[in-house]
Image (tube, helix red, strand yellow):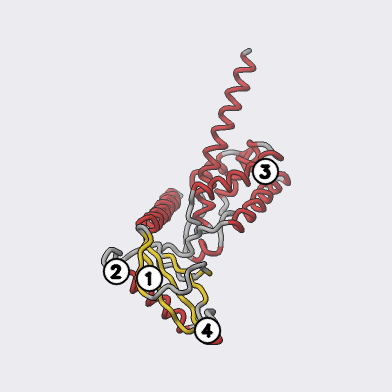
């Protein structure tokens, strides 16, 4: 009975450690890829990691996630370009202080589990729709939108979402590396910010476009309190992670 209770306590501790590491892992995954973390995305990452757990077990996956969190393996080009920290100081300290974890991470199996996690995350990244290309400035990456081609230029409302529409003739060049198109996007964003109920420093603007007549393109910029809140939350997370990283480096 005593052995059974000890095994049960060990199982509970392993379960709790895994869940805590996974939650942290999801946050850093979103941060490093500049993904706006939603419940759906968190669920997708949990499902992906669970497929690796089925093969290797929670203890191995927990150690692999700790290793990835401590060694900057979650880093993505967009995070590196923005100088965002994507390593967790607490995980780094835990790995450094634990000989078994450190040795296992260097082993063939440790490398294999980390690689399997990375492969499953690549599949998740390919399905993510809700991305924040650069939360610190308006989203300048336009996406094809299924909108009413006959909608007039100017401001409209859709619930609490403010929209501003602008049509530009891009010529035969299209929208790629087209100065006229880029200027029109910026103008539409500025015009949206100039609306009475939209903040002058509005964040989280969503920009989309659709083909118009001939070589015309219709640009639509959107802002809502929800988009603003999502942007502010992402900025806050960036600030918290930056402060966390600086505090860790200061202790070294």
Using the numbered discs, state the Cα–Cα distance from disc 3 to disc 1 in whole angstroms: 45 Å
- The residue nearer to you, when weighing 218 against 242, is 218
Q: Residue at x 46, y 76 (%)?
A: 218
Q: Position of residue 220 (x, y in %)?
A: 43, 70
SS state under label 2:
loop
How many labels were placed on the picture?
Answer: 4
N-terminal of the pair, mark 2 or mark 4, is 2
User: What label does residue 164 carry, if any?
Assistant: 1
Above or below, 174 relative to 249:
below
Q: Which residue is mark 2?
A: 195
Q: Residue at x 62, y 52 (%)?
A: 121
N-terminal of the pair, mark 3 or mark 1, is 3
Using the numbered discs, state the Cα–Cα distance from disc 2 to disc 1 in whole angstroms: 9 Å
Of badges 3 and 1, the one in the foreground is: 1
SS state under label 3:
helix
Q: Position of residue 84 (x, y in %)?
A: 47, 59
SS state under label 1:
strand
N-terminal of the pair, mark 3 or mark 2, is 3
- The residue nearer to you, when weighing 99 against 188, is 188
Of badges 3 and 2, the one in the foreground is: 2
Q: Residue at the far right: name it.
A: 108
Q: Position of residue 67 (x, y in %)?
A: 60, 46
Using the numbered discs, state the Cα–Cα distance from disc 3 to disc 2 in whole angstroms: 49 Å
User: What label does residue 52 carry, if any?
Assistant: 3
Q: Residue at x 46, y 71 (%)?
A: 140
Quarter of the image that includes the N terminus: top right
Q: Residues within 10 Å of mark 4 (few under 14, many from 20)?
A: some
Q: Residues within 10 Å of mark 2 (few under 14, many from 20)?
A: some
Using the numbered discs, state the Cα–Cα distance from disc 3 to disc 4 in whole angstroms: 49 Å
Using the numbered discs, state the Cα–Cα distance from disc 1 to disc 4 in whole angstroms: 20 Å
Cβ–Cβ under 8 Å for marks 2 and 1: yes
Q: Which residue is mark 4?
A: 215
């Amino acid at each position: 009975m005593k052995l059974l209770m000890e095994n049960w306590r060990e199982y509970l501790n392993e379960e709790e450690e895994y869940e805590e590491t996974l939650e942290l892992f999801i946050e850093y995954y979103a941060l490093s890829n500049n993904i706006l973390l939603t419940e759906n995305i968190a669920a997708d990452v949990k499902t992906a990691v669970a497929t690796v757990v089925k093969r290797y077990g929670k203890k191995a996956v927990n150690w692999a996630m700790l290793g990835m969190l401590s060694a900057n393996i979650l880093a993505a080009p967009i995070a590196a370009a923005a100088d965002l920290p994507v390593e967790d100081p607490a995980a780094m300290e835990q790995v450094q202080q634990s000989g078994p974890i450190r040795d296992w991470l260097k082993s063939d199996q440790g490398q294999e589990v980390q690689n399997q996690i990375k492969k499953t995350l690549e599949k998740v990244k390919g399905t993510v729709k809700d991305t924040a290309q650069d939360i610190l400035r308006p989203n300048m990456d336009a996406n094809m939108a299924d909108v009413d081609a006959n909608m007039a230029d100017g401001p409209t409302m859709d619930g609490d979402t403010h929209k501003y529409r602008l049509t530009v003739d891009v010529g035969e060049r299209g929208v790629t590396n087209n100065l006229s198109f880029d200027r029109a996007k910026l103008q539409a964003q500025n015009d949206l910010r100039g609306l009475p109920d939209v903040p002058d420093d509005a964040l989280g603007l969503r920009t989309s476009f659709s083909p118009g007549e001939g070589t015309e393109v219709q640009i639509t910029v959107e802002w809502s309190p929800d988009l603003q809140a999502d942007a502010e939350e992402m900025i806050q997370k960036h600030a918290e992670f930056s402060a966390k990283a600086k505090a860790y480096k200061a202790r070294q």
